[in-house]
Every structure is written in structure tokens, then in C-alpha cells.
């Protein structure tokens, strides 16, 4: 067993000064006590199909969802399961492999989101 982990980790660094034992970042940049920020936007979820940089393969993109990172990941997992497809959540955008725009729009509208199809 690692004794460093059990004792709380690094608490001071000569380069950064006092360190947070929870997240391991400098005390000025500590994120332990802060609530995750909810992104701002116009409140409209946009669903589009993107093929750029993917060798012609289509990917359904869901942007503009005003949820924190944990809730967004949960929504992404639910949408991927509904589509029976893989995908990911990156930088506040849900990517689902394949063209599933109609299914995603209907699922999001059923959950109470204002949804628009974007890009054709």
C-alpha cells in the first residue's frame, strides 16, 4: 500500500506553495469546494450531422445542452443506448456514431428540451 496516498498526498511544493490534499492542485487553483459551472447559452439544443474529418462517416452532434458535465455524460450515455450506437461526450458536445438525428430529436423533446435540427 502506498503510504503517500493514505497520508493525504502532497501538501506543499516549493514551486507552487501550498497544495490542496483533495485534488492535488495549488491552493489558488483548487476545485474541490467549487460547484461545477453550468454552461450558458440560448437554451436551444441543436442536433446536426457532421462528416468532416471522419473519412465520410457520419456523426450526430448534439450541442447547446445546458447541463453540468456529469448530467451531460449521463444524457450522452442514455442517447447512445437509445440509438444502439457508440459515441462520446467532448467539450460539452455529445457525439453519437451514425445518422440518428430523428431519434435524438424526439428523445430530447420528450425530456422537455427545445430542439432544432441544424445544418440541413
Image (tube, rainbow, N blue to C red):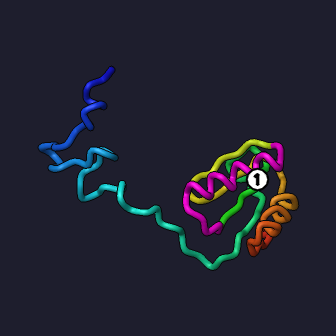
The residue sitting at the left extreme is 14
Classify residue 8 by image quadrant: top left
Residue 36, position as x, y percentages in the image: 46, 62
Pointer 1 residue = 79
Q: Which residues are magenta?
A: 64-84
The residue sitting at the front extreme is 6
63 sits left or right of 25 in the view: right
Vertical arrangement, residue 115 with respect to residue 14, above or below: below
1 sits left or right of 7 in the view: right
**Magenta stretch containing residue 77, yes or no?**
yes
Residue 9, position as x, y percentages in the image: 26, 36
Q: Main secondary structure of the magenta part?
A: helix
Front one among 8 and 43? 8
Residue at 12% x, 43% y: name it. 14
Front one among 72 and 102? 72
- Secondary structure of the residue carrying tag 1 is helix
49 sits left or right of 64 in the view: right
| Label 1: how many Cα within 10 Å (few below 14, some 14–19, many 20+) | many
Residue 105, position as x, y percentages in the image: 82, 64
Vertical arrangement, residue 98 with respect to residue 120, above or below: above
Where, quadrant-wise, is the C terminus in this rendering? Answer: bottom right
**Magenta stretch containing residue 89, yes or no?**
no
Residue 47, position as x, y percentages in the image: 76, 64
19 sits left or right of 100 in the view: left
Residue at 78% x, 73% y: name it. 116
Residue at 76% x, 63% y: name it. 48
Front one among 1 and 119? 1
Where, quadrant-wise, is the N terminus in this rendering? Answer: top left
Amino acid at each position: 500500500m502506498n503510504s503517500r496516498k493514505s497520508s493525504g498526498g502532497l501538501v506543499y511544493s516549493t514551486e507552487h506553495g501550498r497544495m490542496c490534499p483533495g485534488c492535488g492542485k495549488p491552493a489558488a487553483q483548487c476545485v474541490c469546494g467549487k460547484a461545477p459551472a453550468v454552461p450558458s447559452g440560448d437554451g436551444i439544443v441543436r442536433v446536426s450531422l457532421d462528416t468532416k474529418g471522419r473519412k465520410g462517416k457520419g456523426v450526430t452532434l448534439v450541442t447547446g445542452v445546458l447541463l453540468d458535465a456529469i448530467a451531460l455524460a449521463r444524457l450522452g450515455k442514455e442517447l447512445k443506448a437509445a440509438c444502439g450506437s457508440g459515441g462520446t461526450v467532448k467539450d460539452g458536445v455529445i457525439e453519437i456514431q451514425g445518422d440518428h438525428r430523428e431519434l435524438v430529436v424526439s428523445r430530447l423533446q420528450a425530456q422537455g428540451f427545445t430542439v432544432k435540427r441544424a445544418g440541413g
